[in-house]
Image (tube, rainbow, N blue to C red):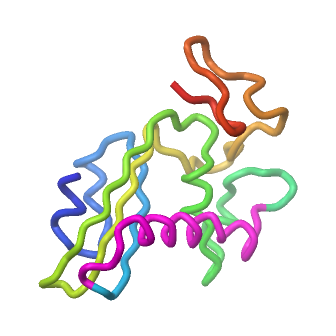
Amino acid sequence: MKHAKKCRYQHSAPETRPGIGENIFQVDIPNFDKTRAAQMASELWFGELKKFGVGQENKFTAKIRNRPKMPIGHYTQMVWDTTRTLGCAVVGCPQARMTFAVCNYKPAGNYREKLIYEKGNPCSKCPHGSRCEQGLCVY
């Protein structure tokens, strides 16, 4: 992934990834184990739910999006209902003294006033041509 190789802890410019959401993560160790860095990123992002919650209505509202010091957008992007494609890269960055992880989600999520996901039985609405694995629709 081009952006990860830049080794800068900042989001890529939205115009370089139209319709694609992005989560970023860094560990302040240059050649940290890449699998462990990916795990840590996922745990941190998903952990926003337990830490901050999204409310019973399960909507990405302006209220939850703009809460000070209570981020939830990494979690909501990870679980966004209509996202179908995920790509991640983890890169060691010796000059920047860090290991950098980037995940891209297509199509992007986090649309205001939209459901984060539809509640129901896992895999009950998997698209034709996909299969159910561990409660997720997989192509």
Q: What's the magenta bit mostly, secondary-structure-wise?
A: helix
Occupied quadrant, residue 93: bottom left
With 71 as the anchor, is 97 left or right in this view? Answer: left
With 69 as the anchor, is 51 left or right in this view? Answer: right
The location of residue 28, given as percent across then percent down, is 33, 87
Residue 111, compared with residue 24, is above or below; it is above
In this orientation, which residue lies closer to the viewer: 101 or 92? 92
- Magenta stretch containing residue 60, yes or no? no
Q: Which residues are magenta?
A: 30-54
In this orientation, which residue lies closer to the viewer: 99 or 104? 99
Residue at screen point 60% across, 60% down: 75
The location of residue 56, given as percent across then percent down, is 87, 56
Q: Single out the residue that lies furthest toward the right.
A: 56
The location of residue 25, given as percent across then percent down, is 40, 72
Occupied quadrant, residue 126: top right
With 65 as the anchor, is 99 left or right in this view? Answer: left
Residue at screen point 76% across, 67% down: 53
The location of residue 55, given as percent across then percent down, is 82, 61
